[in-house]
Amino acid sequence: MSHQPDGGPWPSERPAPPALANAADERQSLEEFLGYYRAALVDRAWGLTHDQLQVQLAPSDLSLGKLLAHMAFVERIWFQVRFAGEEMPEPWSSLDWEADPDAEMTAASTMTIEQLLAQFNGSVDYSKAKLSVVEDLGQLSERTDREGHAWNMRWILIHMIEEYARHCGHADLIRQSIDGDTAD
């Protein structure tokens, strides 16, 4: 990753690239890849102004601010709501999802980088805490899909890696269009 900021809302320890497959067990590999992509998304937004966080690259309406807000929401949905069976916390529980299915992204347009990173880091911290007490990646979620099937933690981790990887690709393109910065 290209940025090495000091202080501020940046995580105190940035993850190294994931370990070689033969050097890590399954859980360590999954956690390292997820941590790496979480940091990669934050890296793409680091150092930008509020206006730059709102830049959209046609034909998409995604912005780096929207991606940070979306992934904060996704972390809560999967770890807190679906896996732990808890209720969705604020600010998401009071958003009007019927009027705006992308309400978490719409709200991002009024947030500062500090607010976006605090929200994102809070969601990631919650997810890490929830994961830290899971002893077996086969543990099933409290909630189920529409057909009544639960997700196990292994599936959730793999899904989160996929979600971050996809959105980090979007973030790379948006960031490059703003100032030419490319992730390394």
Image: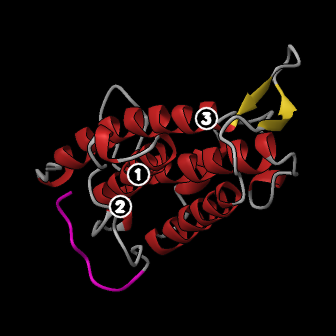
Q: Few, some or many C-alpha atoms within 10 Å of disc 3 (few <14, some 14-19, many ≥20)?
A: some
Q: Please, is residue 49 above or below residue 184 in the view?
A: below
Q: Earlier in the sequence, mark 3 or mark 2?
A: 2
Q: Assess disc 1: are there few (<14), some (14-19) or many (≥20) residues with their C-alpha within 10 Å of its C-alpha.
A: some
**One can see residue 105 in this view:** yes
> Is residue 5 one of those drawn in magenta?
yes
Residue 63, given in percent of the width and then of the height, sits at 40, 45
Of the image marks 3 and 1, the number of the one nearer the N terminus: 1
**Image-based side of 86 in relation to 152, left or right:** right
Q: Circle 3 is placed at which residue position?
A: 154
Residue at 85% across, 18% down: 146
How far is disc 3 from disc 2 in space, using C-alphas?
A: 38 Å
Residue hosting label 1: 32
Residue 154, image x and y in percent?
61, 35
**Pointer 3 and pointer 2: residues touching (CB < 8 Å)?**
no
| Disc 2 target residue | 51
Q: Quadrant of residue 29?
A: top left
Given residues 176 and 78, the one toward you in this image is 78
Callout 1 secondary element: helix
Q: Which residues are magenta?
A: 1-8
Left or right of residue 24: residue 20: left
Which residue appears farthest toward the top when viewing the image? 147
Q: Name the quadrant containing residue 152.
A: top right
The numbered mark, 1 or 2, whose residue comes first in the sequence reads 1
Q: CA distance from mark 3 to mark 1?
A: 13 Å
State the residue in front, 104 or 28: 28
Residue at horizontal 26%, vertical 52%? 17
Are the residues at dot 1 and dot 2 in contact (C-beta closer than 8 Å)?
A: no
- Residue 51 shown left or right of residue 179 in the figure: right
Inspect the image, locate mark 1, and give the three-letter code of the amino acid beneath it. Answer: Glu
